[in-house]
């Protein structure tokens, strides 16, 4: 079980969200909405657990990775 006093993952995620471009942020909002819509209007095979897992992965992996890639591109162009 994770230590509840360890906030580094939470802080890293919030920092990554702060560093998204407007374009990236809108894209992630659209993807999150699409997942919610699939859960709400789909055929019932997309469970609430899967929805939470997918949305969580946006924050814990994909947003952070997107910011890292944007920063790497900026560094290469210098």
Image: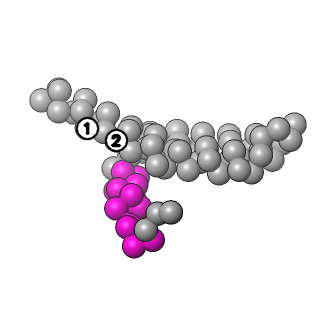
Q: Crowdedness of circle 1 by 10 Å Cα count: few (<14), some, many (20+)? A: few
Which residue is outermost to the top?
77
Q: Position of residue 4 (x, y in %)?
A: 45, 71
Residue 10 in the image: x percent, y percent?
41, 61
Q: Is residue 46 left or right of residue 58?
A: right
The residue drawn where x is 17% and y is 26% is: 77
- Quarter of the picture containing the C terminus is top left
Q: Determine contact: label 2, label 1, CB under 8 Å.
A: yes
Q: Nearer the viewer, residue 63 or 6?
A: 6
Q: Position of residue 39 (x, y in %)?
A: 77, 44
- Residue 15 visible (yes or no): yes
Q: Which residue appears farthest toward the bottom when viewing the image?
A: 5
On the image, which quarter does residue 41 sit in?
top right
Given residues 15 and 48, the one toward you in this image is 48
Quadrant of the image occupied by residue 38:
top right
Report the magenta residues as a range: 4-18
Find numbered disc 2 in the image and state the secondary structure of the residue it sits on: helix
Look at the picture and state if 10 lies above or below 78.
Answer: below
The residue positioned 38% from the left and 66% from the top of the image is 7
Q: Nearer the viewer, residue 24 or 69?
A: 69
Which residue is labeled 1 in the image? 71
Total residue callouts? 2
Question: Where is mark 2, residue-wise?
Answer: 67
């Amino acid at each position: 079980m994770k230590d509840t006093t360890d906030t580094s993952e939470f802080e890293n995620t919030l920092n990554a969200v702060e560093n998204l471009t407007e374009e990236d942020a809108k894209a992630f909002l659209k993807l999150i909405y699409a997942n919610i819509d699939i859960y709400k209007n789909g055929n019932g095979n997309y469970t609430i657990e899967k929805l939470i897992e997918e949305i969580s992965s946006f924050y814990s992996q994909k947003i952070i990775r997107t910011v890292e890639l944007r920063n790497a591109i900026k560094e290469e162009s210098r």
